[in-house]
Image: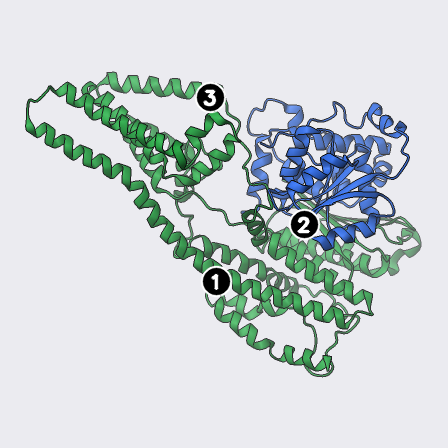
Chain colours: A blue, B green
Amino acid sequence: MSTPAPQPAQPGVAGESTASETEARTGPYTVVVVDDHAMFRSGVKAEIGRAVAVVGEAADAETAIKVILASRPDVVLLDVHLPGGGGVEVLRKVHESDPDQKFLALSVSDAAEDVIGVIRAGARGYVTKSINGTELVDAIRRVAEGDAVFSPRLAGFVLDAFSGSIDVATVDEDLDRLSQREREVLRLIARGYAYKEVAKELFISIKTVETHVSSVLRKLQLSNRHQLTRWATDRRLV
Amino acid sequence: MRVDSGSTRLVSRPNQCEARGVMSSTKSPGVDAGSPGLEALPSPVPVEGPASIPPQPTPPPEPVEGRLDERIARKAQPTMRATEFTARETEPTADESRPRATRVAEGAMLGGVCTGLARHLGLPVMLIRAAFVALLIFQFLGVIAYGALWLLLPAEQTAAAPGIEAASRKGFRDQSKPRRRVDWGMLVALVAFGSGLLWLVQSSGFGISQQLFWPVAFACAGAALVWRQADTEQQKRWRAEAGGKAWLAPFVARGGWPALVRVIVGLGLVGAAFGIVFAQEGHIDQLPEVMAMTTLALAGLAVVMAPWLHRSRTALNQARADKVRADARADMAAHLHDSVLQTLAMIQRQADDPKVVQQLARRQERELRTWLYGEELPETTLKAALTTVAAEVEDERGVPVEVVVVGDCETSDAVQALVRAAREAMVNAAKHSGADQIDVYAEVDDEHIEVFVRDRGSGFDLDTVGDDRMGVKGSILDRMERHGGKAGVRSSPGEGTEVRLEIMR
């Protein structure tokens, strides 16, 4: 089932990021594009092809799993809706054999269920398909470096899901609520601020912003907060 | 030539609208009057003259107080229609406003019967649960009633947006429901409580006589096993929850040998129950006993058959409902494809004007997205209002407006003033900033509502601009103050602008 992907113990902590930097990036980041629309795949390839190396592509879940495990790219661009069980299936199967594979979810659907679902299955970020090339490359880089990518909409969803009081005595309180700082960061992201602008606004470093966002991502993936799952399924039914 | 074919198509449009009006003749009058379909079709194209849309759409009408409501209502209608559709789909004949009694998986402790009943009757769940437990005292009536309702109530079906439903059907989405965490402590407590209660009832003398108790218990267990066969909805879920665990499969899998085993065990238990009674009553004492046994056996058979009969009847109803739904869907799909075709045709015609092409594409995208994946917003909330004005600004100005809302509330005078001010801020950003996107963020909490309208455009120096920026002063700052709210503008050249609006609820 949707076992959340094992996370690095402390996301965003120096050790991890320096490791990826000292790896001596000889070439651009490698990317696999998974989407069932051939037109979209070629479009994305044309847009990001200069900045990153697209090493493989797939149109359904089964092929995707094979391609990803064979090519081990830095980042997988993963469509949420996919023949053969959807993006979540790909995430689950790939993470069974390689828990460190990084995914960036892409979708045309903004439905909360899908967004939260794919994040909880282990994606490191979520962007809508209308994102432009530069922003997409930026998001890929961020995910490749171990950070999380939150669109304003995702930030809004998270704030909504973690709002209100917790009505059950939960096992792990830390996981189930956002800290004041995390909330501030998310609010700014929801207001359309880039990480850099958030950092400037709150007088903190970009690295700290990234740490906060990674920590929110971890909570989103690991929290068993009762409302979280309910919220995502409930909110559509007004 | 091209123009010609374009205008004939446009001329023929009224027919389509008419056809659709017939299709949805049960709509409320407001919907027809607004004819949302017509509005939804991307055709601000004049019917007469060469069919081309003006490169710059009509200048935005200055928002007149009072018209906003109307516009919101009008815009919200497509959404409303969608709501109506789903409502009709799930229960084509029901006319009552209260929800139909169903089994609700969400928040269920056993089968979701109590939750469903509570929703249906409008009573607290705890009360219903207590009632069932109380009924236990009288010959286990509670258990029997609960069991019967579990079997007879249909499982709740939630209709998702068509895009999502289609994706689910085709296996494009992850289908497994989040597994409920099994709380073993609670389970043990429940079992302990149950057996204790059983003991108490049995020993108090209110229960079923000792002689009959075990046979009845056996028979119930057997019948339950057999009946479980019928409950396919539940099984589908359980199998998904078993997640390939082999040892769970015989208990939860459907069809094949597990089902056979279950039937045999079930019938065996029922038979054992009869056997016990028979043995207790003596050997070949009286014929009437045997006769009674035969009757019971037949009754047992009926018990075994009933689920299938029940299911087939439900399946028939389902098929009928599906037909209605399919028809409605086909009509909608036709309409959508038509509107997309129109947009594509217009894009081809306007191919040399990137601005117009972008605007057309963006509008069509928004329309499709809302229809396919959108949530159904009640039309009188802040969220609906903000989404509507954002869409208007987007259409008028050709700048994408991204709206994120956390929490929601009903509209009031103050909220409407807030929305108008927000609209003004969006228009300002679109007009003056030169930014390629506007972000709108609204947050509603218990005490107040905050709205941020932000662009990453040119920005301006607040000091140098001063009073001549009447748009900002009059329609944003003053309006907010009149309604007991606050407004602030933050901007500096090159950094973009952010307008912050705040109002108490």
> Image check: B24 left or right of A85?
left
Q: CA distance from mark 2 to mark 3?
A: 45 Å
Which residue has dot 2 on it? A36
Mark 1 residue crowding within 10 angstroms, few (<14) / some (14–19) / many (20+): few
Q: Residue at x 10, y 28 (%)?
A: B289
Q: Position of residue B65 (x, y in %)?
A: 68, 63
Res B465 label:
none
Chain label for disc 2: A
Q: Residue at x 71, y 33 (%)?
A: A217
What secondary structure is marked by label 3? helix
What secondary structure is marked by label 2? loop
Vertical placement of B448 versus B186: above or below?
Answer: below
> Image check: A237 left or right of A23?
left
User: Identity of the amino acid at label 2?
Assistant: Asp
Q: CA distance from mark 1 to mark 3?
A: 47 Å
Q: Is residue B502 visible?
A: no
User: Identity of the amino acid at label 3?
Assistant: Met
Q: Residue at x 36, y 36 (%)?
A: B229
Q: Earlier in the sequence, mark 1 or mark 3?
A: 3
Which residue has dot 1 on it? B327
Res B186 label:
3
In the depicted view, which residue is nearer to us: A123 or A167?
Answer: A123
